[in-house]
Image (cartoon, rainbow, N blue to C red):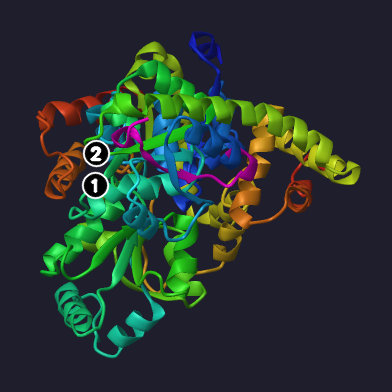
Amino acid sequence: MSKDKRLNVLLIDDEPERVEALTEALHKLGHNVVCHLPNTSDLNKHVEESLPDIVIIDMDSPNRDTLESMATMSRNNPRPIVFFAEKQNDHKTMSDAINAGVSAYIADGLQPERVTAIIDTAIAHFDAHSSLKAELDKARNQLADRKIIEKAKGMLMKHQGCDEEQAYQTLRKIAMDRHQSLPVVAQNVIEALKGLTGMGK
Amino acid sequence: MSDHLALEKTDLKLGFIALIDCAPLVVAREKGFFSKYGLNVILCKESSWASIRDKVSFGLLDGAHMLAPMPLAATLGLNGNKTPMLTALTLSHNGTAITLSQELYLELVDQITDWNNQEAVGNTFKELIQNRERKPVIATVYPYSNHHYQLRYWLNQHNINTEEDVQLVAVPPTQMLENLANGLIDGYCVGEPWNSLALMQQTGGLLTTGHKIWGSHMEKVMGVTQKWADENPNTHRALVTALYEACKWAEDATNRTELMELLALPPYLDHAAKQLATFNPPYSMEQHFYNENLNMPDRDHGLFLLDQMNDCGQLSGIMVDKDQLVEDVFRCDLYKGWIG
Protein backbone atom coordinates (compact mmCIF):
# COMPACT_ATOMS: atom_id res chain seq x y z
CA MET A 1 0.00 0.00 0.00
CA SER A 2 1.33 3.44 -0.89
CA LYS A 3 2.37 5.65 1.95
CA ASP A 4 -0.31 8.31 1.50
CA LYS A 5 -3.06 5.73 2.07
CA ARG A 6 -1.61 4.68 5.38
CA LEU A 7 -3.63 6.20 8.22
CA ASN A 8 -2.67 6.81 11.83
CA VAL A 9 -5.08 5.13 14.21
CA LEU A 10 -5.46 5.89 17.92
CA LEU A 11 -7.18 3.12 19.91
CA ILE A 12 -8.85 3.88 23.25
CA ASP A 13 -9.99 0.65 24.81
CA ASP A 14 -9.25 -1.17 28.04
CA GLU A 15 -9.83 -4.72 26.74
CA PRO A 16 -6.29 -5.98 26.01
CA GLU A 17 -7.32 -8.98 23.88
CA ARG A 18 -9.49 -6.82 21.67
CA VAL A 19 -6.76 -4.21 21.28
CA GLU A 20 -4.26 -6.86 20.25
CA ALA A 21 -6.55 -8.47 17.67
CA LEU A 22 -7.69 -5.16 16.22
CA THR A 23 -4.15 -3.79 16.01
CA GLU A 24 -3.05 -6.83 14.06
CA ALA A 25 -6.02 -6.53 11.68
CA LEU A 26 -5.31 -2.82 11.11
CA HIS A 27 -1.65 -3.53 10.36
CA LYS A 28 -2.80 -6.08 7.77
CA LEU A 29 -4.91 -3.35 6.15
CA GLY A 30 -1.71 -1.29 5.93
CA HIS A 31 -2.49 1.20 8.68
CA ASN A 32 -0.45 2.38 11.59
CA VAL A 33 -1.66 2.15 15.18
CA VAL A 34 0.11 5.18 16.67
CA CYS A 35 -1.08 4.81 20.19
CA HIS A 36 -3.16 2.58 22.34
CA LEU A 37 -4.61 3.93 25.56
CA PRO A 38 -6.83 2.51 28.21
CA ASN A 39 -9.11 5.16 29.73
CA THR A 40 -6.78 8.03 30.36
CA SER A 41 -6.68 11.16 32.45
CA ASP A 42 -4.70 13.16 29.91
CA LEU A 43 -6.35 12.41 26.63
CA ASN A 44 -6.02 15.97 25.30
CA LYS A 45 -2.25 15.75 25.36
CA HIS A 46 -2.15 12.31 23.72
CA VAL A 47 -4.34 13.44 20.83
CA GLU A 48 -2.28 16.60 20.31
CA GLU A 49 0.93 14.61 20.27
CA SER A 50 -0.04 11.58 18.20
CA LEU A 51 -2.15 13.52 15.63
CA PRO A 52 -4.37 10.58 14.69
CA ASP A 53 -6.34 10.44 11.43
CA ILE A 54 -8.89 8.32 13.18
CA VAL A 55 -9.72 7.45 16.78
CA ILE A 56 -11.48 4.16 17.55
CA ILE A 57 -13.04 4.10 21.01
CA ASP A 58 -15.33 1.91 23.09
CA MET A 59 -18.79 3.51 22.82
CA ASP A 60 -19.22 3.35 26.60
CA SER A 61 -15.95 5.11 27.40
CA PRO A 62 -16.43 8.33 29.40
CA ASN A 63 -13.61 9.79 27.27
CA ARG A 64 -15.97 10.22 24.33
CA ASP A 65 -17.24 13.54 25.65
CA THR A 66 -13.65 14.68 25.95
CA LEU A 67 -12.98 13.80 22.30
CA GLU A 68 -16.15 15.61 21.23
CA SER A 69 -15.08 18.71 23.13
CA MET A 70 -11.70 19.02 21.50
CA ALA A 71 -12.85 20.71 18.29
CA THR A 72 -14.60 23.50 20.20
CA MET A 73 -12.09 23.77 23.02
CA SER A 74 -8.95 24.67 21.16
CA ARG A 75 -9.76 26.44 17.96
CA ASN A 76 -6.06 26.72 17.29
CA ASN A 77 -5.80 22.96 16.93
CA PRO A 78 -4.56 22.40 13.36
CA ARG A 79 -6.41 19.11 12.98
CA PRO A 80 -9.54 18.93 15.11
CA ILE A 81 -11.20 15.54 15.22
CA VAL A 82 -14.91 15.15 14.65
CA PHE A 83 -17.41 12.39 15.21
CA PHE A 84 -17.53 10.12 12.17
CA ALA A 85 -21.32 10.38 11.92
CA GLU A 86 -21.18 14.13 11.41
CA LYS A 87 -19.33 13.66 8.14
CA GLN A 88 -20.92 10.48 6.93
CA ASN A 89 -24.66 10.04 7.17
CA ASP A 90 -24.46 6.33 6.47
CA HIS A 91 -27.27 5.09 8.66
CA LYS A 92 -26.42 1.40 8.31
CA THR A 93 -22.77 1.77 9.33
CA MET A 94 -23.70 4.01 12.25
CA SER A 95 -26.35 1.60 13.43
CA ASP A 96 -23.95 -1.39 13.14
CA ALA A 97 -21.28 0.54 15.04
CA ILE A 98 -23.64 1.52 17.86
CA ASN A 99 -24.93 -2.02 18.20
CA ALA A 100 -21.38 -3.35 18.31
CA GLY A 101 -20.41 -0.71 20.88
CA VAL A 102 -17.75 1.06 18.85
CA SER A 103 -17.38 4.75 18.02
CA ALA A 104 -15.07 6.51 15.59
CA TYR A 105 -13.72 10.04 15.34
CA ILE A 106 -11.85 11.30 12.29
CA ALA A 107 -9.56 14.22 11.54
CA ASP A 108 -11.64 17.03 10.09
CA GLY A 109 -11.20 17.20 6.34
CA LEU A 110 -10.37 13.52 5.87
CA GLN A 111 -12.60 11.81 3.31
CA PRO A 112 -14.99 9.55 5.26
CA GLU A 113 -14.63 6.87 2.54
CA ARG A 114 -10.97 6.46 3.47
CA VAL A 115 -11.86 5.14 6.90
CA THR A 116 -14.78 2.88 6.02
CA ALA A 117 -12.62 -0.26 5.97
CA ILE A 118 -11.13 0.62 9.35
CA ILE A 119 -14.54 1.14 10.90
CA ASP A 120 -15.91 -2.09 9.41
CA THR A 121 -12.92 -3.97 10.81
CA ALA A 122 -13.43 -2.42 14.23
CA ILE A 123 -17.12 -3.33 14.21
CA ALA A 124 -16.28 -6.94 13.33
CA HIS A 125 -13.71 -7.17 16.13
CA PHE A 126 -15.98 -5.58 18.73
CA ASP A 127 -18.76 -7.98 17.74
CA ALA A 128 -16.48 -11.01 17.89
CA HIS A 129 -15.08 -9.86 21.21
CA SER A 130 -18.50 -9.59 22.89
CA SER A 131 -19.33 -13.22 22.16
CA LEU A 132 -15.84 -14.37 23.15
CA LYS A 133 -15.92 -12.27 26.30
CA ALA A 134 -19.23 -13.77 27.42
CA GLU A 135 -17.74 -17.28 27.07
CA LEU A 136 -14.53 -16.33 28.85
CA ASP A 137 -16.35 -14.65 31.73
CA LYS A 138 -18.36 -17.80 32.25
CA ALA A 139 -15.32 -20.04 32.28
CA ARG A 140 -13.13 -17.78 34.37
CA ASN A 141 -15.29 -16.81 37.29
CA GLN A 142 -14.77 -18.98 40.28
CA LEU A 143 -17.87 -20.73 41.47
CA ALA A 144 -18.16 -18.61 44.63
CA ASP A 145 -17.73 -15.35 42.73
CA ARG A 146 -20.23 -16.47 40.18
CA LYS A 147 -22.80 -17.15 42.89
CA ILE A 148 -22.38 -13.64 44.31
CA ILE A 149 -22.61 -12.08 40.85
CA GLU A 150 -25.67 -14.14 40.01
CA LYS A 151 -27.35 -13.11 43.25
CA ALA A 152 -26.56 -9.42 42.69
CA LYS A 153 -27.83 -9.71 39.14
CA GLY A 154 -31.04 -11.30 40.38
CA MET A 155 -31.60 -8.54 42.93
CA LEU A 156 -30.90 -5.85 40.36
CA MET A 157 -33.29 -7.48 37.89
CA LYS A 158 -35.99 -7.50 40.55
CA HIS A 159 -35.23 -3.98 41.73
CA GLN A 160 -34.78 -2.40 38.30
CA GLY A 161 -37.30 -4.56 36.49
CA CYS A 162 -34.65 -5.21 33.87
CA ASP A 163 -33.31 -8.24 32.03
CA GLU A 164 -30.18 -10.21 32.84
CA GLU A 165 -27.95 -8.47 30.31
CA GLN A 166 -28.99 -5.05 31.58
CA ALA A 167 -28.32 -6.08 35.19
CA TYR A 168 -24.87 -7.36 34.20
CA GLN A 169 -24.12 -4.09 32.39
CA THR A 170 -25.16 -2.13 35.51
CA LEU A 171 -22.71 -4.16 37.62
CA ARG A 172 -19.95 -3.63 35.05
CA LYS A 173 -20.52 0.15 34.95
CA ILE A 174 -20.40 0.37 38.77
CA ALA A 175 -17.19 -1.69 38.74
CA MET A 176 -15.65 0.69 36.19
CA ASP A 177 -16.76 3.80 38.12
CA ARG A 178 -15.28 2.46 41.35
CA HIS A 179 -12.26 0.65 39.90
CA GLN A 180 -13.37 -2.49 41.75
CA SER A 181 -13.72 -6.11 40.74
CA LEU A 182 -17.09 -7.51 39.77
CA PRO A 183 -17.46 -9.81 42.83
CA VAL A 184 -16.68 -6.91 45.21
CA VAL A 185 -19.24 -4.71 43.49
CA ALA A 186 -21.77 -7.54 43.50
CA GLN A 187 -21.35 -7.97 47.26
CA ASN A 188 -21.87 -4.22 47.79
CA VAL A 189 -24.94 -4.19 45.59
CA ILE A 190 -26.42 -7.07 47.58
CA GLU A 191 -25.81 -5.17 50.84
CA ALA A 192 -27.24 -1.92 49.47
CA LEU A 193 -30.37 -3.49 48.05
CA LYS A 194 -31.00 -5.86 50.97
CA GLY A 195 -32.41 -3.07 53.12
CA LEU A 196 -35.13 -2.24 50.61
CA THR A 197 -38.65 -3.56 51.02
CA GLY A 198 -39.15 -7.02 49.66
CA MET A 199 -35.53 -7.41 48.55
CA GLY A 200 -34.38 -9.41 51.60
CA LYS A 201 -34.10 -12.86 50.15
CA MET B 1 -56.65 3.48 34.72
CA SER B 2 -58.52 3.23 31.44
CA ASP B 3 -56.06 5.67 29.91
CA HIS B 4 -53.48 2.88 29.87
CA LEU B 5 -55.26 1.25 26.96
CA ALA B 6 -54.22 4.09 24.76
CA LEU B 7 -50.48 3.81 25.46
CA GLU B 8 -48.56 2.94 22.28
CA LYS B 9 -45.70 1.51 24.31
CA THR B 10 -45.46 0.59 28.00
CA ASP B 11 -41.92 -0.81 28.37
CA LEU B 12 -39.40 2.00 28.11
CA LYS B 13 -35.65 2.36 28.43
CA LEU B 14 -34.45 5.79 29.52
CA GLY B 15 -30.84 6.92 29.76
CA PHE B 16 -29.32 9.05 32.48
CA ILE B 17 -25.95 10.41 33.58
CA ALA B 18 -25.07 9.98 37.26
CA LEU B 19 -25.66 13.59 38.35
CA ILE B 20 -27.93 14.97 41.08
CA ASP B 21 -30.31 16.28 38.46
CA CYS B 22 -31.22 12.80 37.21
CA ALA B 23 -33.36 12.80 40.40
CA PRO B 24 -36.76 13.14 38.65
CA LEU B 25 -36.13 9.91 36.69
CA VAL B 26 -35.01 8.00 39.78
CA VAL B 27 -37.93 9.32 41.83
CA ALA B 28 -40.45 8.54 39.11
CA ARG B 29 -39.21 4.96 39.07
CA GLU B 30 -38.64 4.36 42.80
CA LYS B 31 -41.70 6.23 44.09
CA GLY B 32 -44.06 4.66 41.57
CA PHE B 33 -44.93 7.66 39.37
CA PHE B 34 -44.06 5.76 36.19
CA SER B 35 -46.17 2.77 37.19
CA LYS B 36 -49.06 5.06 38.19
CA TYR B 37 -49.22 6.06 34.52
CA GLY B 38 -48.87 2.52 33.21
CA LEU B 39 -45.18 2.74 32.33
CA ASN B 40 -42.61 0.06 33.05
CA VAL B 41 -39.27 1.90 32.89
CA ILE B 42 -35.70 0.66 32.96
CA LEU B 43 -33.14 3.36 33.75
CA CYS B 44 -29.84 2.90 31.91
CA LYS B 45 -26.76 4.52 33.40
CA GLU B 46 -24.69 5.95 30.54
CA SER B 47 -21.02 6.92 30.57
CA SER B 48 -21.15 9.98 28.32
CA TRP B 49 -23.53 12.49 26.76
CA ALA B 50 -22.27 11.27 23.39
CA SER B 51 -23.52 7.80 24.22
CA ILE B 52 -26.92 9.21 25.28
CA ARG B 53 -27.20 11.12 21.99
CA ASP B 54 -26.28 8.08 19.89
CA LYS B 55 -28.50 5.61 21.73
CA VAL B 56 -31.51 7.93 21.60
CA SER B 57 -30.85 8.75 17.92
CA PHE B 58 -30.73 5.08 16.98
CA GLY B 59 -33.59 3.92 19.19
CA LEU B 60 -31.54 1.92 21.72
CA LEU B 61 -33.09 4.26 24.29
CA ASP B 62 -36.62 5.69 24.15
CA GLY B 63 -35.47 8.96 25.66
CA ALA B 64 -33.04 10.42 28.16
CA HIS B 65 -31.99 12.95 30.76
CA MET B 66 -30.32 15.55 28.51
CA LEU B 67 -28.44 18.81 28.78
CA ALA B 68 -30.75 21.60 27.55
CA PRO B 69 -28.63 22.36 24.43
CA MET B 70 -28.47 18.70 23.34
CA PRO B 71 -31.82 18.46 21.49
CA LEU B 72 -30.81 21.63 19.60
CA ALA B 73 -27.40 20.21 18.68
CA ALA B 74 -28.88 16.87 17.59
CA THR B 75 -31.54 18.57 15.46
CA LEU B 76 -28.81 20.60 13.76
CA GLY B 77 -26.56 17.53 13.38
CA LEU B 78 -23.69 19.09 15.32
CA ASN B 79 -21.05 16.48 16.12
CA GLY B 80 -23.37 13.64 15.29
CA ASN B 81 -26.00 12.09 13.17
CA LYS B 82 -28.62 14.72 12.26
CA THR B 83 -31.65 13.60 14.27
CA PRO B 84 -34.51 15.98 15.09
CA MET B 85 -35.10 15.86 18.86
CA LEU B 86 -37.44 17.70 21.19
CA THR B 87 -38.40 18.16 24.79
CA ALA B 88 -41.77 18.74 26.41
CA LEU B 89 -40.46 18.94 29.98
CA THR B 90 -37.71 20.78 31.84
CA LEU B 91 -36.37 18.49 34.58
CA SER B 92 -34.27 21.00 36.51
CA HIS B 93 -32.90 24.51 36.82
CA ASN B 94 -29.32 25.47 37.74
CA GLY B 95 -26.90 23.32 39.77
CA THR B 96 -23.65 24.15 37.97
CA ALA B 97 -20.70 26.04 39.40
CA ILE B 98 -17.09 26.96 38.70
CA THR B 99 -14.78 25.32 41.20
CA LEU B 100 -11.12 26.28 41.56
CA SER B 101 -8.25 24.24 42.94
CA GLN B 102 -7.63 24.81 46.63
CA GLU B 103 -4.39 26.65 45.82
CA LEU B 104 -5.99 29.19 43.46
CA TYR B 105 -9.01 29.52 45.69
CA LEU B 106 -6.98 30.33 48.79
CA GLU B 107 -5.05 33.00 46.89
CA LEU B 108 -8.37 34.58 45.91
CA VAL B 109 -9.83 34.30 49.41
CA ASP B 110 -7.16 36.65 50.69
CA GLN B 111 -8.23 39.36 48.29
CA ILE B 112 -11.98 39.03 48.07
CA THR B 113 -14.32 40.27 50.76
CA ASP B 114 -17.63 40.18 48.92
CA TRP B 115 -18.17 37.09 46.79
CA ASN B 116 -21.47 38.49 45.56
CA ASN B 117 -19.67 41.32 43.82
CA GLN B 118 -19.06 39.47 40.57
CA GLU B 119 -17.14 42.31 39.00
CA ALA B 120 -14.62 42.42 41.83
CA VAL B 121 -14.33 38.61 41.81
CA GLY B 122 -13.71 38.62 38.05
CA ASN B 123 -11.15 41.42 38.14
CA THR B 124 -9.26 39.88 41.03
CA PHE B 125 -9.24 36.51 39.32
CA LYS B 126 -7.91 38.05 36.12
CA GLU B 127 -5.11 39.83 37.96
CA LEU B 128 -4.24 36.67 39.84
CA ILE B 129 -3.93 34.46 36.76
CA GLN B 130 -1.95 36.99 34.78
CA ASN B 131 0.74 37.01 37.43
CA ARG B 132 1.16 33.24 37.38
CA GLU B 133 3.80 31.33 35.49
CA ARG B 134 1.44 29.21 33.47
CA LYS B 135 -2.07 29.69 32.18
CA PRO B 136 -4.66 28.06 34.39
CA VAL B 137 -6.20 24.94 32.84
CA ILE B 138 -9.98 24.93 33.26
CA ALA B 139 -12.10 21.91 32.40
CA THR B 140 -15.67 21.32 31.33
CA VAL B 141 -17.36 18.08 30.29
CA TYR B 142 -19.27 18.50 27.06
CA PRO B 143 -19.28 21.14 24.30
CA TYR B 144 -23.10 21.47 24.07
CA SER B 145 -23.84 22.28 27.70
CA ASN B 146 -24.73 25.20 29.93
CA HIS B 147 -21.57 24.60 31.92
CA HIS B 148 -19.36 25.08 28.87
CA TYR B 149 -21.16 28.24 27.72
CA GLN B 150 -21.31 29.61 31.28
CA LEU B 151 -17.58 29.28 31.71
CA ARG B 152 -16.93 31.15 28.45
CA TYR B 153 -19.58 33.74 29.28
CA TRP B 154 -18.09 34.45 32.70
CA LEU B 155 -14.54 34.68 31.31
CA ASN B 156 -15.65 36.99 28.48
CA GLN B 157 -17.62 39.11 30.90
CA HIS B 158 -14.41 39.81 32.81
CA ASN B 159 -12.29 40.32 29.70
CA ILE B 160 -10.40 37.09 30.22
CA ASN B 161 -9.47 35.72 26.80
CA THR B 162 -10.51 32.08 26.40
CA GLU B 163 -7.54 31.34 24.14
CA GLU B 164 -4.79 33.58 25.51
CA ASP B 165 -5.38 33.83 29.26
CA VAL B 166 -6.60 30.34 30.10
CA GLN B 167 -6.46 26.88 28.57
CA LEU B 168 -9.84 25.20 28.21
CA VAL B 169 -9.92 21.41 28.20
CA ALA B 170 -12.49 18.65 28.58
CA VAL B 171 -12.38 15.92 31.21
CA PRO B 172 -14.94 13.25 32.19
CA PRO B 173 -16.76 14.23 35.41
CA THR B 174 -15.56 11.13 37.25
CA GLN B 175 -11.94 12.27 36.71
CA MET B 176 -12.45 15.94 37.68
CA LEU B 177 -11.75 15.64 41.40
CA GLU B 178 -8.66 13.52 40.91
CA ASN B 179 -7.26 15.88 38.26
CA LEU B 180 -7.97 18.91 40.43
CA ALA B 181 -6.24 17.29 43.38
CA ASN B 182 -3.13 16.29 41.40
CA GLY B 183 -2.79 19.65 39.66
CA LEU B 184 -3.49 18.51 36.10
CA ILE B 185 -6.30 21.08 36.03
CA ASP B 186 -6.77 24.29 38.03
CA GLY B 187 -10.53 24.50 37.95
CA TYR B 188 -13.71 23.23 36.33
CA CYS B 189 -17.26 24.14 35.52
CA VAL B 190 -19.65 21.19 36.01
CA GLY B 191 -22.95 20.16 37.54
CA GLU B 192 -23.63 18.72 40.95
CA PRO B 193 -22.44 16.65 42.82
CA TRP B 194 -18.95 17.46 41.52
CA ASN B 195 -18.69 20.96 43.01
CA SER B 196 -19.96 20.00 46.45
CA LEU B 197 -17.69 16.95 46.53
CA ALA B 198 -14.62 19.11 45.88
CA LEU B 199 -15.68 21.46 48.69
CA MET B 200 -16.29 18.59 51.10
CA GLN B 201 -12.96 16.98 50.37
CA GLN B 202 -11.27 20.40 50.46
CA THR B 203 -9.69 19.91 47.05
CA GLY B 204 -11.36 23.06 45.77
CA GLY B 205 -13.40 26.19 46.45
CA LEU B 206 -16.27 27.88 44.60
CA LEU B 207 -15.46 30.77 42.27
CA THR B 208 -19.06 31.36 41.24
CA THR B 209 -22.23 29.49 40.30
CA GLY B 210 -24.17 29.15 37.07
CA HIS B 211 -27.08 30.79 38.83
CA LYS B 212 -25.01 33.86 39.64
CA ILE B 213 -23.79 34.07 36.06
CA TRP B 214 -27.11 33.72 34.25
CA GLY B 215 -29.88 33.87 36.86
CA SER B 216 -32.29 30.94 37.04
CA HIS B 217 -32.16 28.89 33.84
CA MET B 218 -33.23 25.57 32.29
CA GLU B 219 -30.52 22.96 32.92
CA LYS B 220 -31.70 19.40 32.14
CA VAL B 221 -34.62 18.31 29.97
CA MET B 222 -36.40 15.08 29.09
CA GLY B 223 -35.28 14.54 25.50
CA VAL B 224 -36.78 12.24 22.84
CA THR B 225 -36.55 12.11 19.06
CA GLN B 226 -39.18 13.87 16.99
CA LYS B 227 -39.92 10.49 15.40
CA TRP B 228 -40.47 8.79 18.76
CA ALA B 229 -42.75 11.63 19.89
CA ASP B 230 -44.82 11.35 16.69
CA GLU B 231 -45.18 7.60 17.02
CA ASN B 232 -45.91 7.51 20.75
CA PRO B 233 -47.99 10.59 21.65
CA ASN B 234 -49.91 8.97 24.52
CA THR B 235 -46.84 7.29 25.97
CA HIS B 236 -44.99 10.58 25.70
CA ARG B 237 -47.78 12.30 27.60
CA ALA B 238 -47.72 9.61 30.33
CA LEU B 239 -43.93 9.91 30.58
CA VAL B 240 -43.98 13.69 30.89
CA THR B 241 -46.86 13.66 33.40
CA ALA B 242 -45.14 11.04 35.59
CA LEU B 243 -41.85 12.96 35.53
CA TYR B 244 -43.62 16.24 36.30
CA GLU B 245 -45.08 14.68 39.45
CA ALA B 246 -41.66 13.27 40.31
CA CYS B 247 -40.15 16.78 39.91
CA LYS B 248 -42.65 18.08 42.48
CA TRP B 249 -41.74 15.27 44.88
CA ALA B 250 -38.02 15.87 44.42
CA GLU B 251 -38.37 19.60 45.12
CA ASP B 252 -40.23 19.03 48.41
CA ALA B 253 -37.71 19.74 51.18
CA THR B 254 -39.33 17.18 53.48
CA ASN B 255 -38.31 14.47 50.98
CA ARG B 256 -34.65 15.53 50.86
CA THR B 257 -33.27 12.74 53.04
CA GLU B 258 -35.19 10.04 51.20
CA LEU B 259 -34.19 11.56 47.84
CA MET B 260 -30.50 11.32 48.71
CA GLU B 261 -31.00 7.73 49.88
CA LEU B 262 -32.60 6.83 46.56
CA LEU B 263 -29.83 8.53 44.57
CA ALA B 264 -27.21 6.67 46.65
CA LEU B 265 -28.46 3.27 45.44
CA PRO B 266 -25.78 1.52 43.38
CA PRO B 267 -27.60 1.68 40.04
CA TYR B 268 -27.73 5.50 40.29
CA LEU B 269 -25.16 7.84 41.90
CA ASP B 270 -23.83 5.25 44.28
CA HIS B 271 -21.24 6.44 46.85
CA ALA B 272 -21.15 10.03 45.56
CA ALA B 273 -24.68 10.79 46.75
CA LYS B 274 -24.14 9.15 50.13
CA GLN B 275 -21.44 11.68 51.03
CA LEU B 276 -23.67 14.60 50.10
CA ALA B 277 -26.67 13.66 52.23
CA THR B 278 -25.69 15.92 55.11
CA PHE B 279 -23.68 18.55 53.24
CA ASN B 280 -24.68 22.17 52.69
CA PRO B 281 -22.43 24.26 50.41
CA PRO B 282 -21.40 27.74 51.61
CA TYR B 283 -23.82 29.25 49.15
CA SER B 284 -26.58 27.61 47.20
CA MET B 285 -26.25 26.53 43.59
CA GLU B 286 -30.03 26.98 43.44
CA GLN B 287 -30.67 23.57 41.95
CA HIS B 288 -34.44 23.12 41.63
CA PHE B 289 -36.75 20.56 40.08
CA TYR B 290 -40.09 22.28 40.31
CA ASN B 291 -41.90 25.53 40.74
CA GLU B 292 -44.92 26.98 39.01
CA ASN B 293 -42.97 28.11 35.93
CA LEU B 294 -39.92 25.90 35.99
CA ASN B 295 -40.98 22.76 34.10
CA MET B 296 -42.23 24.29 30.86
CA PRO B 297 -39.47 24.18 28.20
CA ASP B 298 -38.00 27.67 28.02
CA ARG B 299 -37.82 29.05 24.47
CA ASP B 300 -36.09 32.25 25.56
CA HIS B 301 -33.30 30.21 27.07
CA GLY B 302 -33.27 28.13 23.87
CA LEU B 303 -32.62 31.29 21.80
CA PHE B 304 -30.00 32.41 24.31
CA LEU B 305 -28.28 29.02 23.96
CA LEU B 306 -28.16 29.38 20.17
CA ASP B 307 -26.36 32.70 20.68
CA GLN B 308 -23.85 31.00 22.98
CA MET B 309 -23.29 28.23 20.41
CA ASN B 310 -22.72 30.84 17.75
CA ASP B 311 -20.30 32.81 19.93
CA CYS B 312 -18.01 29.83 20.40
CA GLY B 313 -18.03 28.90 16.73
CA GLN B 314 -20.32 25.87 16.86
CA LEU B 315 -22.75 27.21 14.28
CA SER B 316 -20.23 28.34 11.70
CA GLY B 317 -21.38 27.58 8.19
CA ILE B 318 -24.87 26.51 9.27
CA MET B 319 -28.01 28.40 8.30
CA VAL B 320 -30.35 28.46 11.26
CA ASP B 321 -33.89 29.81 11.47
CA LYS B 322 -33.54 30.31 15.20
CA ASP B 323 -37.18 30.98 16.04
CA GLN B 324 -38.44 28.00 14.08
CA LEU B 325 -35.78 25.71 15.51
CA VAL B 326 -36.53 26.70 19.10
CA GLU B 327 -40.25 26.27 18.50
CA ASP B 328 -39.69 22.77 17.09
CA VAL B 329 -37.36 21.66 19.88
CA PHE B 330 -38.82 23.24 23.03
CA ARG B 331 -42.42 22.06 22.88
CA CYS B 332 -44.31 24.40 25.19
CA ASP B 333 -47.48 23.47 23.30
CA LEU B 334 -47.23 19.84 24.39
CA TYR B 335 -46.43 20.87 27.97
CA LYS B 336 -49.41 23.23 28.13
CA GLY B 337 -51.76 20.62 26.69
CA TRP B 338 -50.63 17.93 29.10
CA ILE B 339 -49.77 19.73 32.32
CA GLY B 340 -51.75 22.96 31.91
Q: Is residue A9 magenta?
A: yes
Q: In this view, does B314 lie to the left or right of A86?
A: left
Q: In this view, does B272 lie to the left or right of A153?
A: left
In the rendered image, residue B87, in percent from the top left (x then y), is placed at 32, 30
Q: Is residue A71 among what the camera can see?
A: yes
Q: Which of A149 and A191 is in front in this view?
A: A149
**Which amino acid is tagged 1?**
Arg
Q: Earlier in the sequence, mark 2 or mark 1?
A: 1
For residue B10, above or below residue B303: above
Number of residues whose C-alpha sits closer than 10 Å to that of mark 1, classed few (under 14), some (14–19) or many (20 or more): some
In the rendered image, residue A8, in percent from the top left (x then y), is placed at 37, 42
Q: Which residue lies furthest to the bottom in this view?
A: B110
Q: In which quarter of the image is the C terminus of chain B?
A: top left
The residue wearing badge 1 is A79
Is the residue under label 1 in contact with that under label 2 (CB below 8 Å)? yes
For the record, the magenta segment spans A1-18
In the rendered image, residue B114, in percent from the top left (x then y), is placed at 23, 82
The residue wearing badge 2 is A108
